[in-house]
Image (tube, helix red, strand yellow):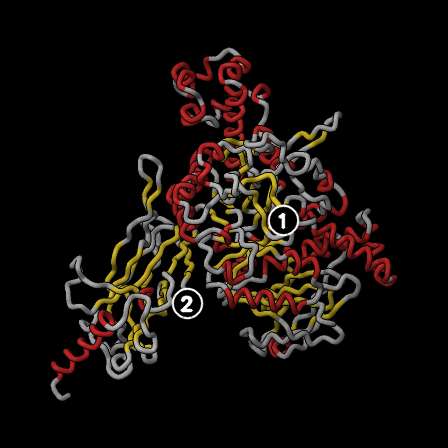
Amino acid sequence: MNNPAEAVLNRQRIIYEKLHEKYRIHRFDNTDVWAGNMRLEVDGRLLPGSTGKIFCTPGENSDAPEVRIFVELYIRDITDTVQLDDGDIDVRLWTDADRHGIVDLKGMHFPDPGYYVPMRLHRGTNGEPLIGGNNAVFVSAPIEITKTGVFSYTVMFSADGKPADDPAKNWLSVNDMAHNRDGVIVVIPPRISECPSLMEVCVRKYGASVDGEGRFVSGKLDNVTEDMENIPVDIIYLLPVFLPGTGDIITGEDVRKGELGSIYAVKDFYKLDPAICSDPRDVDIKHLVSKNLLTSYDVQDLLDGEQQSRLGRVSNFLNFDSNDEIVDFLGEATAVQLVGRAELRRLTHTAHIHGKAVIFDLVLMQTSRDCDLINTHREWYELDEYGVPKKHRIAWLDYSDVALFRLKYNKALQNYLSSVAPYWIQVCGLDGVRIDASQTVDRAFLKQIKNRINEVKPDAVVLGETLCPMHEAVDVPADMIYSLLVDNHVHIDHAAPYYDLFETYHHTFPRNTVAMAYFENHDSARATEQWHEKFSGVLSENKTAQKLWREPAARLSCEPALLMSSLKSIQCSLINMVSGSVSGVRFSYALENGTDFAERTRTDFENKTLLDFLLRETGVGRKLHGCYVELHKLKHGPVASVIPNGNVYYLRDNRAANNDGRVFALARYDEKLQLLFIANLDPASPRKARFALDFLALDIKTKYVFKVVFDTYNEMGIGNITPPPPLSGRYLSEGLSEIELMPLQSVLLNLCVSA
């Protein structure tokens, strides 16, 4: 065909026939027509995969990232034989980027309908179309991201010749033509990129006691507030603080789990648990008003119409003669909710003063069996053949005290639940949520939750629980996900499984994923107790180990197995802190309250067991707590800036003799800093480490020295490491330097040019 115009018309006719006439939607022969490979480019960096994660400082005046979307199209005998030209096919991007949706006057949330962005052939610097194998490549106009949230995108094609704005134009999406998923952009506040540390706190157990008659006296919100200086993390994660239920609304039975009932059996998402609030008769309510810890919104929200007409505004509390008069006027139930809100605000305000954030547990899967929603919205629950809400069962676990929601795609219920977090964030100044069992929730609902939260608090933290196989957590649209490394830390004492695990994380998850890593939580036995049992067995069988541990344990007035367990605890937290990579998954280390002072008793919030905070004051508990305090300081020091923002190199090849694979080591490095982390996983024998550092840009003639940044033996007061003398870059590159670590010792070293 020698006529160029005729060739163009013929090409366009073939494209039209293959797109619009030959196949039905979802019935395309992908050997003939295919579209897909959508990918995200952020500030010139390609992020592969259907879920892209980016960090953004929210606000119109921020340094907003610029996003472009790429897509590929294959049409046999067209894209594999000739180059397409602009005008051969219309392509557009649909997205709701930077839009959270709206909440109407009735409180219903509606997703944003989105908007269209033009796309055109991707061209090189000389204007030539760039192809992907046999595929044409299209790229969108730039999109500026100024908000945190979760946003979607997809691409549409048309070759019917009608104008782009014609309502009758026939658009085909990539999902119509091939097996694709809409792209997702998770926009994360920058505080998450710094890998904030977390501590799980059960208020019920914080400062709890048992009185002389054996009654459990719950810990209070104020106990956490007053102890703020002793919580060595960036984020305090509160287990559920809402009014729990204990009964069954239909049968009248007491169905509580354990002696106290579960805090995950939520009876009312909009009321605080009275047990964690101070008795209002023991509180100076007028003082709370003067400190702005009670608000006019509390009056409107909690008081009935008659009370509001008399009180008017919150300052009128000051007109009452006594505190008892205020409580009598309000009623005990209302008064305790007012006091509870004031105390929760005080907790968050105090945390903010100390540079910490406070998030709370958002329970989505169930309520207690005496929740009023069972009567008012029975259709929100999974029902048995008798119309009774089903119990929540997962595998062998039987949550007999809760009623299971029918959550999936249930828009009314999802709207109700997605309003809970924004409410408490606005009312009490909280900083975000942990989403219970997020991996089981449909992704559109998780998107709604994060967007509603980010609409009211752009830098809020949204942590998604993901206790599931890795591949099921890849697309969870949260700022942070879980990495609960219980089995790895408690049962593994060789380095290879750690290397395999962390490298699998880096290969599985999209860049900029941040995973909260910890080795115990309220569902598991205390790691310290498990290690204590394990190390007691080691000591009973190994006389050399007995002799080795006897003196340092005596120095701390503790049994050897407890000292060993404490060293293992800080070792695992260090591993959790340093094992991430800026080019893969970053890790935020996390603790359960009590981990930091060698507590062996489970949190076990369903029963009357107590955490012994006096362990923090003496002996090995005091030393371990000091370790975690110093670790927190280290994390915010200048040397440690490489930890969230540097690359990682796992040092698998230990050239030291007889190391038995018991030394875990890695390097974290960037253009300014090179940190070397080494941990002896062996509880009974010293081990040596010798690694070739040829991957670092070391000058072969320059002399370098290892400076100790953190040494767990030194922090615990039982010894220290002797780093090698200054060595040349050649010597280090060839792996001729050797370091010996004592059992369970862990060190972080800074490789510096020798002065």
Considering only order in the chain, which callout, 1 or 2, is on the residue closer to the N terminus?
2
In the picture, measured across the screen, residue 169 lies left or right of residue 511, that is left
Element on which disc 1 rests: strand
Q: Which residue is mark 2?
A: 48
Residue at image coords 54%, 64%:
505
Image-based side of 352 in relation to 393, left or right: left
Element marked by disc 2: loop
Residue located at (42% from left, 48% from top) = 450
Visible in this render: residue 613?
no
**Residue 3 drawn above or below residue 73:** below
Residue 200 placement (x, y as % from top left): 59, 45
Q: Residue furthest top?
A: 321
User: Which mark, residue 397?
Assistant: 1
Q: Quadrant of residue 455?
A: top left
Rendered image: mark on residue 446:
none
Q: Nearer the viewer, residue 150 or 256?
A: 256
Tell me the amino acid under the disc marked 1: Leu
Q: Residues within 10 Å of mark 1 (few under 14, many from 20)?
A: few
Instruction: Work out whether residue 168 or residue 716 is closer to the camera in this orientation and state it.
Output: 168
Give the vertical position of 437 relative to 35 (above or below): above
Where the C terminus falls, by quadrant?
bottom right
Instruction: Find the distance from the CA under tag 2 to the CA under tag 1.
Output: 37 Å
x, y percentage for residue 4? 13, 83
In this orientation, which residue lies closer to the viewer: 383 or 474?
383
Q: Alpha-carbon neighbours of circle 2 within 10 Å: few (<14), some, or many (≥20)?
A: some
